[in-house]
Image (cartoon, rainbow, N blue to C red):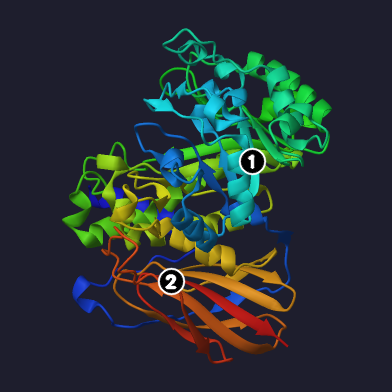
Amino acid sequence: MSINRRTFIKSAAFAGAGLAASPELSAGARSVVVKAKEGIEIDPEPTFALSPYLYMQFMEPLGRTDGSVEAAWDFSKHAWREDVLEATRELAPSMVRFGGIFSSYYRWREGVGKRSSRVPMQNLLWGGYESNQVGTAEFVDFCRQVGADPLMCVNFESEGSPGWSIDGMGSDRRGTAQEAAEWVDYCNNPDNALRKAHGIEGPLRIPFWQIGNETSYANDRFHLETAVQKTLAFSKEMLRADPSIKLIGWGGLQRWGEGKETFWAREMIERAGEHLDYVAFHHMFNPYGRDPDNPLKGVDYRKDPARTWEYLMNACAFHEKKVVAMREQVEPYQMPMALTECHYSFPGRNRNEVMSTWATGVSYARMANLHERHGDLLKIATMADFCGTRWQVNALMIPIPRSYGEAFLMPVAKVMKLYRKYSGTGYCATTQTPAYLDVTASRKGNTLFAHVVNTHRTSPVKTTLSLKGETIASIKVHEMAADPEFEVIAREPDPLQIQTKEAPIDGTWTFPAASVSAVEIQLV
């Protein structure tokens, strides 16, 4: 990479987070404390509400590619694996979405009723067959056991794709608006006869529903005009079944030919917005796809840790461009955004083992801060696929067979767990931030939280924290820090445990190198 290119990327990344770029210390300078010239200054008056759904998870049956859902199910006990439940409760997602591309050929009636009568289905994209032992009732049961709200993605007439409309056995896989409405009724109507016949007396109650998955992502799927008309048809039928549900329509990026990239959100809102509560977009991205010097491919990340760190810290700038572009679409209408799929997709085996490193965890923390900054309009968001057996983009990894170990949290999940546990309900502006520190803040009652990411790989940063017009009663710092090259490959050993420490009320603190912290401040 040329010096100009490196300088440009570093400047763009730090500018996007409101940070001042400073010269990187050499690797040999580890443990040399950087004394910040500026302190962290926070305006403690909240400016907008932060949604708890910024920490949702996304569950999709991925067939032979990554046996996610079926691997989490204990077929001998006809129940969810207890270690998966335990790890998910630790993660504490606010919402779990079921669907994805899988929704484009999923027929919900095949996954309800007696398990002995359920019809297996061909997983047209991810390969193999799904047993359908995990269906609607099982998914809702999982959400209830872990304390998450369920979000269901409906079959949107196979998105218009011929490849998903008919399977290898000649079965029609297209789901209609009527079928989607009947699914809503099956779940939410207290008197639904079919559900009761299946032995489920009370409602399953799914409050959130997404119409389709990624309708604009290929030329063989619905074009905009058709998508709008069918979104109207689906939303009207589904709301007729239950007017209280929250609907998410597709508004993400479309690609029709080389170099042409536009969004659907504006047209979708103007023409179908009265029936929608959110518009969705996705971002699974490799920010350095055309960079020949990209260390985030294969095992190159192990060759030069300092360079790998630099790329990972700057990657957030590319995500910010996507979020801002979507924001420009919805802001005139104040329509909330739903980022229902999002994660890095660096090339390599299993989408690259670099995502098992703590360095990537710190990079994801920058993305979490970005989501909070746009939390006035971004109301649903994730940063990972939820669970699986091999993909490094998963939040939760499931060893197979069970005797190989218990389910464990990946670095991205460690960050989401920290933020989920220590966050306020109202966003507070950070009016001053020292170099190397990426900071956001939020408040709930008399408790203020600051999320602080030390983007320096080798050195701690010492600074002070102050709040405009408030008196501090006490400060605790909940931090995670480890060698950036540490790779999570099992439940143990696990240096990424949250360490809680008392801090002086004058706000002076030293944030460890390569750390992610949640500062909990009690106000008088």
Residue ranking furthest to the top: 170
Mark 2 vs mark 1, foreground winner is: 1
Rendered location of residue 62, percent (x, y): 42, 34
The residue carrying pointer 2 sits among few (fewer than 14), some (14 to 19) or many (20 or more) residues within 10 Å by Cα, namely many
Residue in the foreground of this view, choosing between 473 and 291: 473
Whichever of labels 2 and 1 marks the residue nearer the N terminus, that label is 1
The residue carrying pointer 1 sits among few (fewer than 14), some (14 to 19) or many (20 or more) residues within 10 Å by Cα, namely many
Q: Identity of the amino acid at label 1?
A: Leu
Tag shown at residue 435: 2
- Compared with 308, 454 (above or below) is below
Tag shown at residue 151: 1
Q: Secondary structure at mark 2?
A: loop
Residue at x 57% of width, y 29% of height: 111
- Compared with 410, 274 (above or below) is above
Which of the 4 quarters of the picture holds residue 277?
A: top right
Residue ranking furthest to the left: 303
Q: Identity of the amino acid at label 2?
A: Ala
Rendered location of residue 149, percent (x, y): 66, 49
Residue in the foreground of this view, choosing between 452 and 54: 54
Rendered location of residue 14, percent (x, y): 43, 59
Residue at x 45% of width, y 46% of height: 72
Residue in the foreground of this view, choosing between 201 and 97: 201
Q: Secondary structure at mark 1?
A: strand
